[in-house]
Amino acid sequence: MVNARRGAISRLMWALVIGLFLGALFTRLAVLFLPDGATREFLTTTVSASLGPLSIDLIAIALVIGPLTLNLNALSLVGILLVGLVIRSWL
């Protein structure tokens, strides 16, 4: 039961990560090839959320991570949806 849940969470995380990368690729292609207009503006308008910087000081080791930023737009959602459909069809 625990391994099945861990596998499902793992697949979900991989789908999100790969979908976000695919959406970023779609966004870059839209910026390069779509003419200026409402469609391009709608597809490439991004909402950003950031966290950080996060600093951890363990006396012997100090680590600073960040800031971590998540950019989300319509094409990112399309990328996540496509990866989710592919994963669902394979399993």
Image: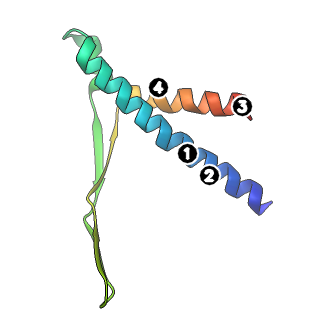
Q: N-terminal of the two: label 3 or label 1?
A: 1
Question: Residue 68: image x %, image y %?
Answer: 31, 55
Task: Compute the Cα span from label 3 to label 4.
Answer: 19 Å
Q: What amino acid type should be assigned to the residue bearing mark 1?
A: Trp
Q: What amino acid type should be assigned to the residue bearing mark 2?
A: Ser
The local secondary structure at tag 4 comes to: helix
Question: Residue 16: image x %, image y %?
Answer: 51, 42
The answer to whether mark 2 and mark 3 are in CB contact below 8 A is: no
Q: Nearer the viewer, residue 53 or 39?
A: 53
| Mark 4 or 2: the one toward you | 2
Do we see residue 13 in this rendering? yes
The answer to whether mark 2 and mark 1 are in CB contact below 8 A is: yes
**Residue at coordinates 24% horizontally, 12% vertically from top-left?**
38
Residue occupied by mark 3: 90
Q: N-terminal of the two: label 2 or label 3?
A: 2
Residue occupied by mark 2: 10
**Residue at coordinates 74% horizontally, 35% vertically from top-left?**
91
Residue occupied by mark 1: 14
| Mark 4 crowd level (few <14, some 14–19, many ≥20, 10 Å Cα) | some
Q: What amino acid type should be assigned to the residue bearing mark 4?
A: Val
Q: Is residue 67 above or below residue 69?
A: below
Label ID, residue 53? none
Q: N-terminal of the two: label 3 or label 4?
A: 4
Task: Compute the Cα span from label 4 to label 2.
Answer: 20 Å
Residue 76 horizontal side relative to residue 59, left or right: right
Task: Compute the Cα span from label 2 to label 3.
Answer: 15 Å
Label ID, residue 78? 4
| Mark 1 crowd level (few <14, some 14–19, many ≥20, 10 Å Cα) | some
**Residue at coordinates 49% horizontally, 39% vertically from top-left?**
18
| Mark 2 crowd level (few <14, some 14–19, many ≥20, 10 Å Cα) | few
